[in-house]
Image (cartoon, rainbow, N blue to C red):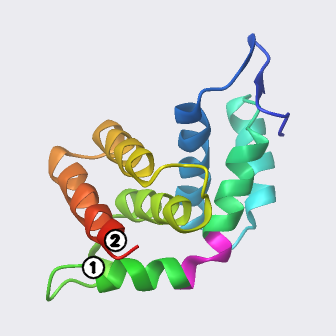
Amino acid sequence: MCQNDINPENPKKLSRYKIREQAFFLCFESLFSDTDIDELADNAGDARDEILSDIAVERARGTMANNVTIDERISANLKEGWKITRISKVSLALLRLAIYEMLYEKDIPVSVSINEAVELSKKYTTEDDAAFVNGVLGAVAKTL
């Protein structure tokens, strides 16, 4: 259930933060299912009675389509001895989305992608995870 980034309760466009949060939810949910993003979006919209942003769905779709490249960037920027399988699912979804934006969404400044991912991490994980997300994304940014 998507509708051109309009919130039915407030006819203004959704904030960039809310769009990114919706994309994060879809990326997170995709870690537990082989269901494609469009079906996850439909299910999420129905379950939460929320209209999902077309942009959020497109970003989640792009993130999942580029997982191999994105995961290579994550793995290359982890501390020695760390593997991607050790990262919490929430942090992994946030890292993937932010790195997708950094690599493929040229109209979004890298610093915004990092900051928003850290803010979402603070909201949905621990302070340690937020610092971890910030560190990995900072390292990735240096390679761009």
Q: Residue at x 57, y 59 (%)?
A: 27
What's the CA distance linking mark 2 and mark 1?
Answer: 6 Å
Give the answer, above or below, for where 102 lies relative to 15: below
Q: Are marks 2 and 1 in contact (CB under 8 Å)?
A: yes
Q: Which amino acid type corresponds to the residue marked 2 in the rendered image?
A: Val
Relative to 38, is 141 on the left or the right?
Answer: left
Where does residue 4 sit, x and y in percent of width and height? 84, 34
Q: Residue at x 73, y 37 (%)?
A: 52
* Disc 2 crowd, CA 10 A, few/some/many (<14, 14-19, 20+): many
Give the SS element for disc 2.
helix
Q: Earlier in the sequence, mark 2 or mark 1?
A: 1
Give the SS element for disc 1.
loop
Per the image, the residue denoted by label 1 is 77
Residue 68, image quadrant: bottom right
* Disc 1 crowd, CA 10 A, few/some/many (<14, 14-19, 20+): some
Q: Is residue 133 magenta?
A: no
Residues in magenta, as a range: 64-68
Image mark for residue 34: none
Dominant secondary structure of the magenta stretch?
A: helix
Q: Residue at x 28, y 40 (%)?
A: 122
Q: Residue at x 74, y 38 (%)?
A: 53
Relative to 16, is 144 on the left or the right?
Answer: left
Relative to 8, is 102 on the left or the right?
Answer: left
Tell me the quadrant of the picture where the N terminus can be found.
top right
Where does residue 125 sit, x and y in percent of width and height? 29, 46
Give the answer, above or below, for where 111 lies relative to 141: above
Relative to 91, is 102 on the left or the right?
Answer: right
Residue 144, image quadrant: bottom left
Where does residue 77 sit, x and y in percent of width and height? 27, 79
